[in-house]
Image (spheres, rainbow, N blue to C red):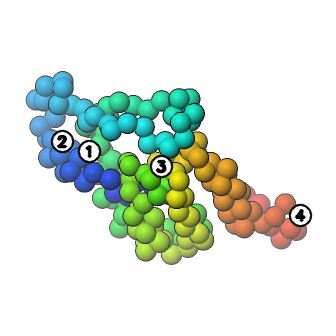
């Protein structure tokens, strides 16, 4: 689970999206979008290669909020092994989401806080660590290639 958005960094956007959901069709075009504060990638070169959206449709925010509401109570029912990683500088989904995963998931193998990364951790300054942690987790769960008892799916 990479930069999981169980809650948003700006809860007011979520509240506005929920309230606006029913009124959306009557909104003028300019009200149908939420302006983003900028890129959520700390690495300058990665920001250049991976430009972000300047605006997000309000309808998408409302859908995400609805999904969050459905998913959070289901976390304890997830029995599959899990790895969670989150950037401490995430402006989209606060790092507190990592604590929610720690509390909710019964089979969380590791929760990794990335001190120098923002939301898009797969291309940010600690992308190599993200890749290493994912490979380590998969090796643990699936078994090492030379392990005769490893699981085969």
Q: Name the N-terminal-most of marks 3 and 2.
A: 2
The mark lying in front, picked from 3 and 4, is: 3
The mark lying in front, picked from 3 and 2, is: 3
Residue 53 falls in which quadrant of the image? top left
Q: Name the N-terminal-most of marks 2 and 4.
A: 2
- Disc 1 designates what residue? 62
In the foreground, 89 or 24: 89
Q: CA distance from mark 1 to mark 4?
A: 47 Å
Q: Position of residue 119 (x, y in %)?
A: 46, 48
- Disc 4 designates what residue? 146
Q: Is residue 39 above or below residue 96?
A: above
| Residue drawn at point x = 67 percent, y = 63 percent | 137
Q: CA distance from mark 1 to mark 3?
A: 23 Å
Q: Position of residue 59 (x, y in %)?
A: 26, 37
Q: Position of residue 125 (x, y in %)?
A: 59, 46
| Residue drawn at point x = 58 percent, y = 42 percent | 123
Q: Which mark is residue 21?
A: 2
- Disc 3 designates what residue? 118
Q: Name the N-terminal-most of marks 2 and 1.
A: 2
**Neighbours of disc 3 within 10 Å: few (<14), some (14-19), many (20+):** many
Q: CA distance from mark 3 to mark 4?
A: 36 Å
**Neighbours of disc 1 within 10 Å: few (<14), some (14-19), many (20+):** many
Q: CA distance from mark 3 to mark 2?
A: 29 Å
């Amino acid at each position: 689970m990479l930069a999981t958005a169980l809650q948003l960094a700006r809860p007011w956007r979520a509240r506005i999206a929920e309230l606006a959901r029913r009124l959306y069709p009557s909104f003028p075009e300019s009200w149908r979008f939420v302006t983003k504060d900028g890129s959520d990638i700390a690495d300058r070169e990665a920001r250049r290669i991976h430009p972000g959206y300047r605006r997000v449709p309000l309808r998408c925010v409302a859908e995400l909020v609805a999904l969050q509401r459905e998913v959070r109570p289901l976390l304890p029912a997830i029995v599959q092994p899990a790895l969670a990683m989150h950037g401490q500088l995430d402006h989209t989904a606060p790092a507190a989401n990592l604590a929610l995963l720690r509390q909710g998931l019964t089979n969380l193998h590791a929760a990794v806080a990335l001190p120098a990364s923002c939301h898009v951790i797969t291309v940010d300054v600690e992308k190599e660590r993200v890749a290493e942690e994912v490979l380590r987790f998969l090796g643990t769960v699936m078994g090492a290639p030379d392990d005769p008892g490893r699981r085969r799916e």
